[in-house]
Image (cartoon, helix red, strand yellow):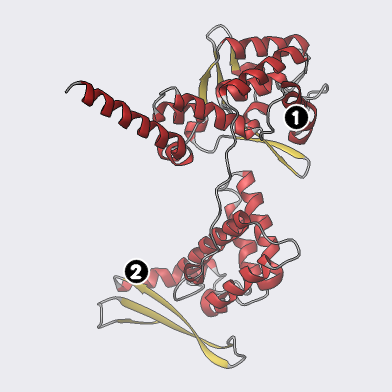
């Protein structure tokens, strides 16, 4: 039977239910209670009824799912339908590294010191956890504890809010210069490589590798000189899948210039027109192309043939954005071309370029003002 009363300190209604006894983190037997809060007595009563229904007709102490591992299994299964496949895989792998250290601990007893000890252990493994992976783990655990609190499984401050996972250093972008990019384009057109058009699309359209490998011939509109980015090819443990873009803006049109159209024409001449998949870049049997195979057999040989410095394939996308910005293209236009969710992302990623342009603009204005004197 619930005892519902109005708290004098703030006027909130409190519903408290006694659930017998449980053993705390120190091994002591303590009285177990569940507490619910609301602005009115009816709100509290409804919360108690809802919780009772969710838990099979009988409330449990703290509403706990048991251990942290048990709760994370439940929580990750729920998130799977809300996250992109890659996001789910990344967060699941991050948790798999952590659960051996902390998974067996009771959800309701996990504190900031436990999280801090976990991070130290992961950093001191023979193969230390990458800062970016640790950040993913931290974000996932933080959200998992927030959701547990909403279901009255845990109380008090979120332990993840009291711990910092450490700084993630931004990766250095090493885009090719204009002259180096021209050499790479020349190597592509002269190579005869079946997939060199993928490199040309990255250079001229700023597309991600997954977006390029996910292109179908039906996405190409040669007469109107544009292509449509509709999907991205995902690869995990040798399995392929297609997913929508990261955001609505990621699904976009890209204008095809002379270089891109010529490259696609070369690709069409050597492609298997009977391929059931309709993929532009695929194996001879129509299966999706592995990223590793593409890099090894196409991209790296083209870099060597062009005699340009080594650059990651993704750096071609950075080069596309950098060259556009240096030519005075507005940040908003570059952001739309890249498929970023908003121009702020573009500004942050390329602040070194926009900073140079701002300095150049200031000098130009200064020169104009001096000339007017």
Q: Nearer the viewer, residue 368 or 57?
A: 368
Q: In this figure, which residue is indicated by the disc labeled 1?
A: 300
Q: Residue at x 39, y 68 (%)?
A: 46
Q: Position of residue 9 (x, y in %)?
A: 25, 82
Whether residue 277 is visible here, answered yes or no, is yes
From the viewer's perspective, is 152 left or right of 360?
right
Whether residue 59 is visible here, answered yes or no, is no
Q: Quadrant of residue 229?
A: top right
Contact, mark 2 vs mark 1 (Cβ under 8 Å):
no
Q: Position of residue 372 (x, y in %)?
A: 18, 21
From the viewer's perspective, is 26 left or right of 96?
left
From the viewer's perspective, is 129 left or right of 341?
right
Other-residue count near label 1 (Cα within 10 Å), few / some / many at <14 / 14–19 / ≥20: some
Quadrant containing the N terminus in the rendered view: bottom left
Q: In this figure, which residue is indicated by the disc labeled 2?
A: 43
Which SS class for mark 1? helix
Q: How many marks?
A: 2
In the rendered view, would you say 29 is above or below 279? below
* Mark in the foreground, 2 or 1: 1
Q: Quadrant of residue 208?
A: top right
Quadrant containing the C terminus in the rendered view: top left
Res 208 label: none
In the rendered view, would you say 86 is above or below 185? below
Which SS class for mark 2? helix
Q: Which numbered disc, 2 or 1, marks the residue that appears first in the sequence? A: 2
From the viewer's perspective, is 371 left or right of 312?
left
Extreme-left residue of the structure = 373
Q: Position of residue 73 (x, y in %)?
A: 65, 62
């Amino acid at each position: 039977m619930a005892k519902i009363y109005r708290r004098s300190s703030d006027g909130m209604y409190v519903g408290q239910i006694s659930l017998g006894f449980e053993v705390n983190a120190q091994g002591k037997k303590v009285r177990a209670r569940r507490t619910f809060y609301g602005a009115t007595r009816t709100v509290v009563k409804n919360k108690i009824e809802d919780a009772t229904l969710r838990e099979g007709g009988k409330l449990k102490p703290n509403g706990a799912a048991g251990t942290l591992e048990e709760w994370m299994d439940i929580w990750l299964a729920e998130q799977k339908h809300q996250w992109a496949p890659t996001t789910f895989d990344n967060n699941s792998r991050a948790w798999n590294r952590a659960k051996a250290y902390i998974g067996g601990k009771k959800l309701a007893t996990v504190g900031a010191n436990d999280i801090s000890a976990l991070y130290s252990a992961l950093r001191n493994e023979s193969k230390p956890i990458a800062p970016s992976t640790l950040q993913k783990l931290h974000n996932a655990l933080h959200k998992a504890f927030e959701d547990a609190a909403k279901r009255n499984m845990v109380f008090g401050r979120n332990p993840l809010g009291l711990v910092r996972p450490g700084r993630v250093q931004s990766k250095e972008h090493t885009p090719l210069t204009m002259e180096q990019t021209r050499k790479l384009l020349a190597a592509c057109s002269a190579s005869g490589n079946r997939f060199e058009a993928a490199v040309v699309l990255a250079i001229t359209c700023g597309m991600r590798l997954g977006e390029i490998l996910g292109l179908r011939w039906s996405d190409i509109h040669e007469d109107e000189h544009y292509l449509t980015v509709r999907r991205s090819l995902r690869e995990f443990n040798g399995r392929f899948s297609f997913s929508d873009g990261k955001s609505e803006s990621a699904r976009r049109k890209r204008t095809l210039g002379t270089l891109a159209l010529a490259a696609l024409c070369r690709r069409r001449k050597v492609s298997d027109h009977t391929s059931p998949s309709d993929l532009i870049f695929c194996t001879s049997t129509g299966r999706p192309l592995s990223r590793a195979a593409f890099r090894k057999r196409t991209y790296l040989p083209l870099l060597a043939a062009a005699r340009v410095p080594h650059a990651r394939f993704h750096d071609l996308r950075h080069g596309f954005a950098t060259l556009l910005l240096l030519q005075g293209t507005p940040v908003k236009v570059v952001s739309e071309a890249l498929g970023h969710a908003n121009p702020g992302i573009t500004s942050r990623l390329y602040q070194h370029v926009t900073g140079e342009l701002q300095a150049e603009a200031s000098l130009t204005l200064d020169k104009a003002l001096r000339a007017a004197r």
